[in-house]
Amino acid sequence: ISWAYEQLGQGHSSPVVAGEHIYTTGMTDGTGYLFKFNMDGTLVYSKAYGPEYSESFYGPRGTPVIVDDKIYLMSGYGQLMCMNESDASLLWKLDMVNDLGGDTIRWGYNETPVVDGNVIYATPGGRNSVVALDRNTGEVIWSCRGKNELSAYCTPLLFHHNGRKMLTTHTESHLLGIDANTGDLLWAHKHPNK
């Protein structure tokens, strides 16, 4: 073992390496923290980002996503955040429930945001089952009702098929296939989230 850090608190997030740094999240006393380390294990910062899920399976679930000079993460309560990579200062934040019409599911939001170019995709569930946002401002580009269900415990998958960019994800009772450029629902397949 080259180094270890034992003050992350609770959580289920994975570490991610970007450039010369390692990033992860954890929860202490009900508050979520974003951690940034040098490769030798030196802590660069530990930044509180707000309340984190503490009803069951304590702590953050999603993994931070680093793109250029920004960090994106989603709390178990569905707070989708964009932070400055250098100091973790907040650039914008959206509430998946209050701002996007979702509903916190039984064990909290368990999603890592998907970033593609200047777009970020997320799954609030409810009337805006899946959304595409401008990753620099948080403004909604499109929303897809899907089957008007709660989200599920997964991260969307972005891929190309037959010349079309598609986003696939799981909601409460369906797998959804969505045109990633327009937000049009292309297909749905019944599959309960169990």
Image: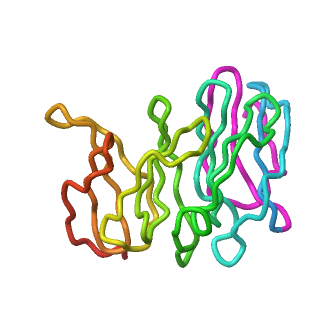
* Vertical position of residue 66 compared to residue 24: above or below: above
Comparing 126 with 86, the one in front is 126
Q: Decide which of 39, 20 is in the foreground and name it.
A: 20
| Magenta span contains residue 6 | yes
Q: Is residue 42 left or right of residue 22?
A: right
Which residue, as the protein is rendered here, is positioned at the far left?
Answer: 162
Above or below, 160 relative to 20: below
Which range of residues does the magenta coloring cover? 1-29
Q: How is the image coloured?
A: rainbow
Q: Main secondary structure of the magenta part?
A: loop
Residue 140 at what x, y percent from top left? 50, 49
Q: Is residue 51 magenta?
A: no
Q: Residue at x 84, y 43 (%)?
A: 46
Which residue lies at the image location 78% right of the left edge and 28% below the top edge? 86
The x, y position of residue 169, in whole percent, is 35, 56
The total number of labels drawn is: 0
Question: Where in the figure is residue 170, as x and y percent of width and height?
Answer: 35, 62
Residue 105, above or below 12: below
- Would you identify the image quadrant in which residue 43 lies? top right
Residue drawn at 53 percent across, 50 percent down: 112
Point out the image quarter for the C terminus. bottom left
User: What is the residue that sits farthest to the top in this orientation?
Assistant: 20
Left or right? Give the position of 64 relative to 150.
right
Towards the viewer: 13 or 164: 164
Q: Quadrant of the N terminus?
A: top right
Query: At x 35% / y 41%, what residue is drawn?
Result: 158
